[in-house]
Image (spheres, rainbow, N blue to C red):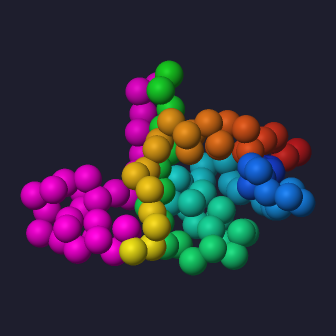
Amino acid sequence: MKAYQLKIELVGSKPLIWRRVIIPADVTFRRLHDTIQFSMDWWDSHLYEFEFPQEKLHITNDEGVWNDPKHPEHEEIRQWGESQHYRPFDIAFRNNLLKTCLKIKKVQ
């Protein structure tokens, strides 16, 4: 079975916080998200979003609540987000972090 070894680093952490994980080559984005969450001891409380501009590919689990003002739960979720001091999601910033912190290599 083909696999990849990922090094996940939290950019800007002092001291550097990082994890090394091995994932199957055919991993889904949902499973990649779960792996990152589990390895960092996070609680899966955020949406995930992966973007590959060269392939014009955008993968997310956002079902529209956050970005659709017409969604019935939008205002409630927005207010909750503000109470948690959330900022608007900046996909370009997040993708840049991923480019600098995920180092992938094939596992033999």
Question: At 73% from the left edge and 45% from the top edge, which residue is drawn?
Answer: 102
Q: Is residue 74 magenta?
A: yes
61 or 91: nearer the viewer: 91
**Relative side of 2 to 59, left or right:** right
**Relative side of 43 to 45, left or right:** right
Q: Position of residue 44 (x, y in %)?
A: 53, 72
Q: Position of residue 15 (x, y in %)?
A: 89, 60
Q: Is residue 89 magenta?
A: no
Residue lying furthest top? 54
Residue 8: tell me if it is visible: no
Please state the total of marks drawn on the protein image. Answer: 0
Question: At 74% from the left edge and 49% from the top edge, which residue is drawn?
Answer: 11
Q: Position of residue 87 (x, y in %)?
A: 44, 56
Q: Quadrant of residue 19?
A: bottom right
90 or 83: nearer the viewer: 83
Residue 48: tell me if it is visible: yes
**Relative side of 71 to 93, left or right:** left
Magenta range is 55-82
